[in-house]
Amino acid sequence: MNVLTKPAVIGSIEELRSRLTDAQSRIESARAGRGEAGLGRPRIVLVPTMGALHAGHLTLVRRARSLGDIVVVSIFVNPLQFGVGEDLGSYPRMLEADVAALAAEGVPFVFAPTSQLMYPDGAASTRVVAGAVGSLFEGAARPGHFDGMLTVVAKLFNIVGPDVAVFGQKDAQQVFLVERMLADLNFRTRIEVVPIVREDGGLALSSRNRALEPAQRAAARALSAGLEAAASVAAQGVGAALQAAHARIDVQPLVKLDYLVVVDPRTFLPVGGEHHGPARMLVAALVGHTRLIDNVALDLP
Ligand code: AMP
């Protein structure tokens, strides 16, 4: 590995902030030395992750590089967004491999805090509340998940101070709720959303896919196949789209469907059968003990 591109792995808020200020000053002086004026303050771009990085995460990192001057990738398995009985303990953790992958992408800073640093009192005493949409779909299956997710996103934004943060469309409800939090709480950070990265065969990449056995992985492809079938008949309406997706998914005994819904992207609430215009189909299922989610845009004429 090229030592020059090895990211600094930082576990202290003060150190991260001072390294970012230094990096901004260095970029500004280099620009001044080249006679480049008027470019403004060097931009910081954050990619929040829980680690166990795959090609989907690295696509976010590449987008981040194109959006600013200094990329920070955070790696933190946030206990606040895991419920009792969920996979917090078994969630894959592989910091060394993650850092090597980020080195190859030229990422300068990895923020990898401990839970103790993020939640010195064991759990944050102040939390962001996701509101009604936070209790639907993923929030119905995972009570408190979105409050925990928004709380850590707010903390990371305050720690890093990014101009832009990059999120994946794979977690569509997360994107909706983060965007709303930024507007409702007047954050300066804006977010950039990257399309879903899929493996050959359509399965959306996920850190949780590591837990799938080969037969489960094959069965899990029914989710993306169902969404694709739905998108291809969307011109016939919501009912036809749902039917096409069910026809692919319900025949897989290894796939235990949790929900399959079509939502209005403006409200994230389920649409009626007569809905016209942009919509998004969301799916969640258990394959073995692994919870998988996916989604696709539908255009309902
Ligand atoms: P996670 O580590 O699972 O919390 O994901 C970190 C970020 O990567 C989130 O914004 C996810 O939406 C995004 N992400 C995860 N998997 C994918 C994927 N297959 N395609 C695009 N973005 C993804």
Image (cartoon, rainbow, N blue to C red):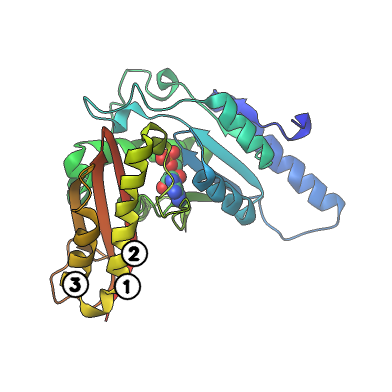
| Distance Cα–Cα, label 1 vs label 3 | 10 Å
In the picture of the structure, the residue carrying the numbered disc 3 is: 240
**Other residues around mark 2 within 10 Å, as few (<14) / some (14–19) / many (≥20):** many
Do the residues bearing badges 2 and 1 touch, measured as CB atoms within 8 Å?
A: yes
Q: What residue is shown at x 17% (from left), y 50% (from top)?
A: 132
In the picture of the structure, the residue carrying the numbered disc 1 is: 232
Image quarter (top left, top right, bottom left or bottom right) of the C terminus? bottom left
Please indicate, yes or no, whether residue 188 appears anywhere in the rendered image: no
Q: Is residue 187 left or right of residue 40?
A: left
Q: Nearer the viewer, residue 115 or 77?
A: 77
Q: What residue is shown at x 42% (from left), y 34% (from top)?
A: 210
* x and y percentages locating residue 21 in the rendered image: 65, 37
* x and y percentages locating residue 245 in the rendered image: 23, 62
**Other residues around mark 3 within 10 Å, as few (<14) / some (14–19) / many (≥20):** some
Q: Nearer the viewer, residue 189 or 241?
A: 241
Q: Amino acid at mark 2?
A: Glu
**Other residues around mark 1 within 10 Å, as few (<14) / some (14–19) / many (≥20):** some
| Mark 1 vs 3, N-terminal side | 1
Q: What residue is shown at x 42% (from left), y 50% (from top)?
A: 187
* x and y percentages locating residue 296 in the rendered image: 34, 62
Q: Amino acid at mark 1?
A: Ser
Please indicate, yes or no, whether residue 61 appears anywhere in the rendered image: yes
In the picture of the structure, the residue carrying the numbered disc 2 is: 228
Tell me the tag on residue 165: none
| Distance Cα–Cα, label 2 vs label 1 | 6 Å
- The quarter holding residue 78 reads top left
| Distance Cα–Cα, label 3 vs label 2 | 13 Å
Tell me: residue 62, above or below residue 54.
below
Q: Nearer the viewer, residue 187 or 133?
A: 133
Tell me: residue 300, above or below residue 9.
below
Q: Amino acid at mark 3?
A: Ala
| Mark 3 vs 2, N-terminal side | 2
